[in-house]
Image: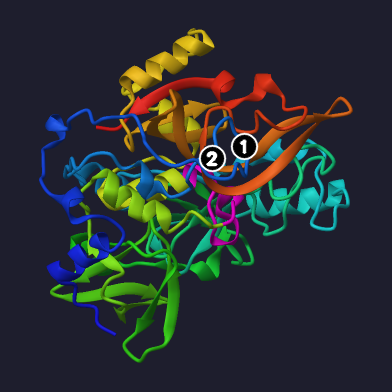
Amino acid sequence: MKHLISNLNIVKFFLLPIFAFLLVGCAPKSEIATPETNISVKKLDNLYFDKLALSQNPNDYVKDSNTTLFDSFHLKSKIFGVWNDDYTATLSESFWAEDIIKRDGYAENLQKYNLEEKKIWLKDMKSSIEVNKKGIISRNTDARALPTKRPYFYDPKKAGEGYPFDNLQLSRLYANTPIKIVAKTLDGAFYYISSSLTDGWIDSRDAMPLDEKQVEFLRESNLFVTVKDKTPIFDDNGEFIEKMQIGSFVFESKDDFYSIDGAKISKIKFDDKSFIKLPLEFSGATFASLANEMMNEPYGWGGYLDNRDCSMFMRDLFLPFGIYLPRNSHDQAMKSSEYIDLSNFSKNGKLDFVKQNAKPFLTLLYLKGHILLYLGTFDDEVIVLHDVWGFAYDKNGVEQRFVIGKPIISTLYLGSSYDNFITKKSLANRLLGIRTLH
């Protein structure tokens, strides 16, 4: 195994799935051309009862060779911001989670939690000890709303409330994510941490406190991002450390590569085609290549089981290009001056606006609780890429879910040809606005 990355390997990675001419040229951000948006792809079997049967290969939707190099300064400042001396986070900021368990909840055995069980979690949270140290995630871990690993489902009989929708699951946090260790439970089992993605409770064994010398070393290192999903990394002795996701990174200094390994910073080895220096040059072709790495991955609410939900899917796809996106769909779209509110438009008005103004592979479409990426148009239908649990349909007056549970390419009428599809819950009807990344 080699960890020395050459320009040749970088080129080879992106030329394998696509034609070489797609990667020619480079333009600054302000010169991104508006590409042709109409897509010409063959129709396939309609797996998801969509208005059109579409290819599920993102490469089929690349129509131009425009490239750009985004400035990754904002991304890095967000990632490392928790290590700033003036960064503040407090234990009391975690107390909002008490509201989650005011509503009846169900455990992994589908039995209702009793009040005493909830009181234990609240006691563990509120009796925690302030720490306030700089730290880093040492292995992929879950950020939780309360100091427990147990799930908290609402009514399992209702669509969208049972498995996998654990209301205490906030996000998966990848190894090498900088954090502020805010507090720890009295028994030391959980840390309350703050990060660029989310604040929450993690298993204390999945984090490493850092001294100032270590912080300085990591902060001054280059970041190399994963371009092969679930890439294993190893220490100098060939011992396994972690599987790295697209959306994660390792550190490089003086031609050596490093990752957190338990309670130490270790030199690492990996397949030399698996990591590239941040930021990658952006194009539809390179983006499609990364997306293809994840197309068959199961949906994972809050990053459950190292999978992704809709917003984590988007966040992880854009990070290698130096583009920072917050963790949830609302913030990805609306916490930006680039957001355009379409909520007062008619349905047809919204769709016309998208067709006329959206840019393939750069425009996010926002619905309440869901985020999608615009790929272009086909047969005058808006085509999107998104990681989705399913669509709603009616069964004897009760709303149900047709479960898809993975990333797909669809129109905004996903599910519309299914019997008793709930039309008012179509993606087209629920569209609220768009954001084009610049």
Q: Position of residue 77 (x, y in %)?
A: 26, 46
Mark 2 = which residue?
A: 93
Count of marks overlaid on the render: 2
Which residue is depicted at the point 24% across and 78% down? 3
Residue furthest to the bottom in view is: 237
**In the rendered image, which quarter is residue 342 located in?**
top left
| Quadrant, the N terminus | bottom left
Q: Position of residue 426 (x, y in %)?
A: 62, 25
Mark 1 = which residue?
A: 96
Q: From the viewer's perspective, is 154 left or right of 436?
A: right
Q: Amino acid at mark 1?
A: Trp
Instruction: Say above or below: 266 vs 42.
Output: below
Gap between marks 2 and 1 measured at Cα: 7 Å
Which structural element holds mark 2? helix
Q: Main secondary structure of the magenta part?
A: helix
Instruction: Say above or below: 12 vs 34.
Output: below
Q: Amino acid at mark 2?
A: Glu
In the rendered structure, does residue 305 fall within the stretch colored magenta?
A: yes
In the rendered structure, does residue 78 fall within the stretch colored magenta?
A: no
Which residue is depicted at the point 21% across and 52% down? 279
Report the span colored magenta. Answer: 298-312
